[in-house]
Image (tube, grey):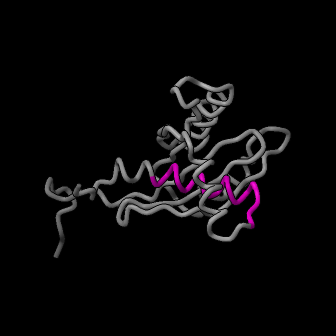
Amino acid sequence: MSTSQNNGDQKAPPRVVLGFDFGEKRTGVAVGQELTGTARGITTLISKNRKPDWDAISHLIEEWHPALLVVGRPLHMDGTEQPVTHLAYRFGNRLSGRYNLPVEQVDERLSSYEAEQELSEESGKYSPEDIDQRAAEKILQSWLDNHSRDNTK
């Protein structure tokens, strides 16, 4: 007995997605998936000589097997680019090239500020790494909220 794998009525399975809050010193990372539409911060990677920790990123790709990568696009409040905006674009392009995965950029305005405010309210004790990880979660959650296949809103 076989089941049809090419039925036009079947949806593609929900994807696992990794989100990145890129920075020259640290990069926060979050994982999310479309089935539940939720994201959670998983780690903050420390840059080596202002370069991403590609070994650690490779490990995360191998561990989570994402179908898509989301990178925060840092912008000023008026929507204009910051000096780090170009570096975030470059990081996204390098992710795509290294791992042969699609990369989407997401507006990350206020993600770090909101992350810091939440952490302050929750415990009052937090590190820059905690902020970056939470910011990555916020960036990815924003993408999931706007792109989830099961979004019935």
Task: Kindly identify the residue that appears in the image at 60 percent across and 40 percent down.
Answer: 95
How far across and down, in percent of the image, does residue 70 sit?
A: 51, 45
Q: Quadrant of the N terminus?
A: bottom left
Is 66 situated left or right of 44 in this image? left
Q: Residue at x 58, y 29 (%)?
A: 76
Q: Position of residue 15 (x, y in %)?
A: 40, 57
Above or below, 84 against 70 in this view is above
Instruction: Name the dominant secondary structure of the magenta segment.
Output: helix
140 or 69: nearer the viewer: 140
Q: Which quadrant of the structure image shows residue 63?
A: bottom right
57, above or below 130, in the image: above
* 19 in magenta: no
Outermost residue, bottom side: 1
Location of residue 50 with respect to 122 vertically, above or below: above
Q: Residue at x 50, y 38 (%)?
A: 107
Q: Is residue 135 magenta?
A: yes
Residue 39, given in percent of the width and then of the height, sits at 49, 61
Question: Left or right of 30: which side holds 26?
Answer: right
Which of the pair 75/32 is nearer the observer? 75
Who's the residue at 78% across and 45% down the image?
Answer: 47
Q: Which residues are magenta?
A: 125-141
Residue closest to the far right: 49
Residue 144 is situated, as x and y percent measured from the top left of the image, at 40, 53
| Drawn side of residue 106 relative to residue 122, left or right | left
Quadrant where the C terminus lies? bottom left
Which quadrant would residue 109 be assigned to in this image? top right
User: How many numbered discs, if any?
Assistant: 0
